[in-house]
């Protein structure tokens, strides 16, 4: 990437990859980024699009039609209320057109033109504030409605992906009041917007936060990386939606909390936090078919 970054919002947009905002470290200080970069897989080049008026990180990003939509997250000073769109390589921002409630480190996904947002907190440092609320945001009207609450404890930085009209949420971090400390989880659930209902899944194989998920096809989700019990991990699994089972899969090229984006025939592993107070600018890619064939 042009700059090392983590906590950014990334996704596919018209055959290209968008990396928006994020954070990195400069001189021992955490910096919040307002940059927007676009990667062209055919040319294997990055270009910088128009920068945002304010920084943003730890938000939700989804592709709906020909538009990459971003909402929630934090500016580094306060929860973001902006609605950001990338259309045809142009960045559009409606400063107060997004969520009225905080959604930092939330899980999210697009279902039937709605953006489902669940969990999260009001500040990346406020793990005690992690919640269970589930909402649907309509990017056309700017309206929000409450849905069934997440059935587990309040959580953040979970892996999430949409398959067959359901939002799948894996692992993450929660606050253990009894021990007055954070705790990684193995919980996994799926939410159906049509039924407004959550269902439990088989637990993720390891407790981890900062896990990243990406749908490979209509039956499989690739889950990888994050921070485990004592350090960052490169471990990866493929989850079979039909059988509700995990199989060990091709590991990440490095340990960390990374960005994963499916674009064309590839899954891209992008940047992220590879050690404490450090970000990487690395980018790798692997064929989707390779991940599906080499699941163990």
Image (cartoon, rainbow, N blue to C red):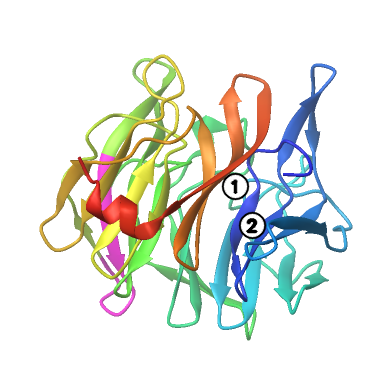
Q: Position of residue 207 (x, y in %)?
A: 30, 29
Q: Which residues are magenta?
A: 187-197
- Residue at position x 43%, y 36% in the image: 252
Label number found at residue 104:
1
Relative to 136, residue 272 above or below: above
Q: Residue furthest left?
A: 243
Is the residue marked by circle 2 packed among few (<14), some (14-19), or many (20+) residues within 10 Å?
Answer: many
Q: What is the total number of numbered labels drawn onto the structure image?
A: 2
- Residue at position x 18%, y 45% in the image: 246
Give the image quarter of residue 195. Answer: bottom left
Dominant secondary structure, magenta: strand
Residue with the mark numbered 2: 72
Relative to 103, residue 247 above or below: above
Q: Residue furthest front?
A: 43
Q: Position of residue 194 (x, y in %)?
A: 30, 80
Residue 151 visible in image = no
Among numbered discs 2 and 1, the one appearing first in the sequence: 2
Is 192 within the magenta?
Answer: yes
- In the image: residue 23, left or right of residue 58: right
- In the image: residue 70, left or right of residue 245: right
Secondary-structure class at tag 2:
loop
The answer to whether the residue labelled 2 contacts the one labelled 1, judged by CB atoms less than 8 Å apart, is: yes
Relative to 218, residue 27 above or below: above
Q: Position of residue 290 (x, y in %)?
A: 32, 53
Secondary-structure class at tag 1:
loop
Is the residue marked by circle 1 packed among few (<14), some (14-19), or many (20+) residues within 10 Å?
Answer: many
Q: Position of residue 248 (x, y in %)?
A: 22, 38
* Alpha carbon separation for disc pair 2 and 1: 6 Å
């Amino acid at each position: 990437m042009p700059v090392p970054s983590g906590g950014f919002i990334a996704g596919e947009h018209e055959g290209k990859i968008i990396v928006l905002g994020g954070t990195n470290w400069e001189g021992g200080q955490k910096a919040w980024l307002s940059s927007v970069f676009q990667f062209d897989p055919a040319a294997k080049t990055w270009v910088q699009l128009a920068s945002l008026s304010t920084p943003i990180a730890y938000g939700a990003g989804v592709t709906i039609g020909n538009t990459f939509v971003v909402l929630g997250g934090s500016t580094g000073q306060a929860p973001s209320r902006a609605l950001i769109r990338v259309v045809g390589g142009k960045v559009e921002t409606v400063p107060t057109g997004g969520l009225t409630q905080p959604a930092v480190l939330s899980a999210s996904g697009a279902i039937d033109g709605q953006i489902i947002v669940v969990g999260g907190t009001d500040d990346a440092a406020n793990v005690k504030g992690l919640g269970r609320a589930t909402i649907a945001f309509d990017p056309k009207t700017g309206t929000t409605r409450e849905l069934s609450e997440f059935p587990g404890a309040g959580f953040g930085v979970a892996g999430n992906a949409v398959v067959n009209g359901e939002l799948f949420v894996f692992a993450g971090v929660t606050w253990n009041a009894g021990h007055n400390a954070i705790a990684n989880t193995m919980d996994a659930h799926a939410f159906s917007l049509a039924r407004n209902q959550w269902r439990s899944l088989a637990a993720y194989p390891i407790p981890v936060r900062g896990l990243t998920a990406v749908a490979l096809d209509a039956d499989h989700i690739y889950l990888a990386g994050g921070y485990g019990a004592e350090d960052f991990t490169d471990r990866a699994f493929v989850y079979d939606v039909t059988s509700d089972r995990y199989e060990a899969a091709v590991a990440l090229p490095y340990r960390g909390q990374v960005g994963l984006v499916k674009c064309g025939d590839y899954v891209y592993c992008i940047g992220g936090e590879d050690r404490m107070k450090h970000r990487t600018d690395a980018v790798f890619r692997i064929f989707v078919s390779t991940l599906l064939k080499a699941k163990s």
